[in-house]
Image (tube, helix red, strand yellow):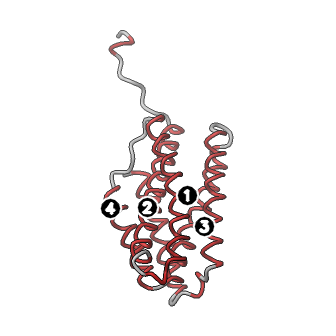
């Protein structure tokens, strides 16, 4: 069989794992932008919440830059995005809007919980990528630092003082971990 008639080789386990990582990271940044948009939709409509709306807008801008990077990486590495993009958009916006309607501290508790999961997730990924993909590992480490900054902002704004913080935080963390597993495959 001539090379032109051969089907392309199946990706190896390392290629498959890298594709899963990129798909999850893209989905996560997509979801983060949606969460902040939901929060901002609530706070921007309330004149006395201008300061928190501005803070959320700044964090959203950081996530949007991360998303652009993963958009480019998906194209360059020929990785398909998650098929659940519309669900992530609706769920993220809904989570953001609901936590904002619960108040500033609940919105910050949402940010703190999401960023805590992502910080750990990015740390594990960067370590796994160090040997074979040092440039990508460095990018992910930088994004991890940005996520830590968002988490610290949320903590400083009183995330732990949100009504029902323990339950809210656990539920959001569980949802984030589940979304990571689903986005790897679908």
Residue 14 lies, in percent from the top left, at 54, 38
User: Nearer the viewer's eye, disc 1 or disc 4?
Assistant: 1
Circle 1 — which element? Answer: helix
| Callout 2 secondary element | helix
Q: Are marks 3 and 2 in contact (CB under 8 Å)?
A: no
Up the image or down, 154 lies above or below 115; here it is: below
Whether tag 3 and tag 1 are in contact, CB under 8 A, the answer is yes
Is 140 on the left-hand or right-hand side of 85? Answer: right
Badge 3: few (under 14), some or many (20 or more) residues near its Cα, within 10 Å? Answer: many
Give the residue number, with chain letter if any, for mark 2.
Answer: 31
Which comes sooner in the sequence, label 1 or label 4?
1
Q: Residue at x 51, y 44 (%)?
A: 17
Q: For mark 4, does the 10 Å Cα neighbourhood hold few (<14), some (14 to 19), or many (20 or more) residues?
A: few
On the image, numbered disc 4 is attached to which residue?
Answer: 87
**Could you tell which of marks 3 and 1 lies nearer the N-terminus?**
1
Query: Which one is in front, 110 or 41?
Result: 41
**The residue positioned farthest toward the front in the image shown:** 47
Q: Position of residue 88 (x, y in %)?
A: 37, 61
Q: Secondary structure at mark 3?
A: helix
Q: Which of the marked residues, 2 or 1, is nearer the chain's N terminus? A: 2
Q: Indicate which disc, 4 or 3, sits on the residue closer to the N terminus.
A: 4
Crowd tier of the residue under label 1, counting other residues whose Cα lies within 10 Å: few below 14, some 14–19, many 20 or above: some
Q: Position of residue 18 (x, y in %)?
A: 52, 42
């Amino acid at each position: 069989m001539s090379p032109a008639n051969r089907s392309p080789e199946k990706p190896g386990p390392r290629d498959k794992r890298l594709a899963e990582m990129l798909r999850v990271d893209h989905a996560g940044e997509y979801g983060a932008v949606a969460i902040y948009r939901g929060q901002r939709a609530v706070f921007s409509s309330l004149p006395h919440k201008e300061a928190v709306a501005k803070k959320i807008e700044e964090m959203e801008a950081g996530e949007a830059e991360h998303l652009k990077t993963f958009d480019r990486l998906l194209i360059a590495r020929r990785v398909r995005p998650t098929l659940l993009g519309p669900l992530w958009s609706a769920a993220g916006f809904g989570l953001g809007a609901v936590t904002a309607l619960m108040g500033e501290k609940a919105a910050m508790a949402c940010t703190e919980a999401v960023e805590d999961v992502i910080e750990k997730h990015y740390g594990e990924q960067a370590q796994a990528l160090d040997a074979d993909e040092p440039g990508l590992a460095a990018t992910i480490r930088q994004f991890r630092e940005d996520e830590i900054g968002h988490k610290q902002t949320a903590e400083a704004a009183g995330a732990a003082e949100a009504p029902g913080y323990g339950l809210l935080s656990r539920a959001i963390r569980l949802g984030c971990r589940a979304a990571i597993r689903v986005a790897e495959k679908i």
